[in-house]
Image (cartoon, rainbow, N blue to C red):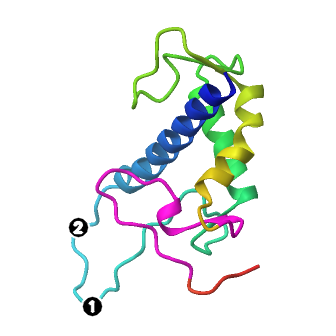
């Protein structure tokens, strides 16, 4: 059961982040015409609130809790199958309580943190299909 919960929570993490990142890149209308000399602006990851191109545990935790609240349409602290991200499709009757979700946050973060530096950056961050990889941090900040 624990393994199933981690898998569901990991899928929720990835789906929620991809949805947030995708919404951010598609929500704003495209500017009319950019001057040729204007530098390209980087896509800012919604989890990176301090602008250092990586997500700390605190940034990740806040973003994930915000995503849970956004997905919990009826605000009952349980994500039902209809409220869960639909890719991959949830099984009918599948549920994820806020308690289990929060219990699995740290293991989910640690699973995504491949280099174990305490931050999610670059390819460690799930992204929308077709989106460019997040830039690697210029220098490791501690």
**133 magenta-colored:** yes
Label 1 element class: loop
- The percent position of residue 36, horizontal first and vertical second, equals 22, 86
**113 magenta-colored:** no
- Nearer the camera: disc 2 or disc 1: 1
Residue occupied by mark 2: 32
Tell me the quarter of the picture where residue 37 sits. bottom left
Out of 48 and 30, give the one closest to the viewer. Answer: 48
Identify the residue at the far bottom of this view.
37
Tell me the quarter of the picture where residue 87 sits. top left
Q: Is residue 100 left or right of residue 113?
A: right
Q: Magenta span: helix, strand or loop, mainly?
A: loop
Vertical placement of 123 versus 18: above or below?
Answer: below
Residue at left offset 40%, top offset 30%:
88
Mark 1 Cα-neighbour bin, 10 Å: few <14, some 14–19, many ≥20? few
- The percent position of residue 45, horizontal first and vertical second, equals 52, 61
């Amino acid at each position: 059961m624990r393994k199933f919960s981690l898998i569901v929570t990991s899928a929720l993490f990835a789906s929620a982040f991809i949805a947030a990142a995708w919404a951010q890149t598609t929500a704003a209308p495209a500017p009319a015409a950019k001057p040729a000399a204007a530098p390209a602006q980087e896509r800012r990851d919604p989890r990176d609130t301090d602008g250092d191109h990586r997500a700390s545990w605190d940034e990740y935790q806040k973003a994930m809790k915000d995503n849970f609240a956004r997905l919990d349409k009826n605000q009952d602290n349980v994500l039902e199958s209809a409220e869960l991200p639909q890719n991959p499709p949830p099984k009918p009757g599948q549920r994820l309580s806020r308690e289990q979700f929060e219990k699995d946050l740290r293991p989910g973060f640690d699973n995504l943190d491949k280099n174990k530096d305490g931050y999610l950056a670059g390819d460690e961050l799930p992204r929308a299909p077709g989106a460019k990889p997040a830039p690697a941090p210029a220098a490791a900040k501690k």
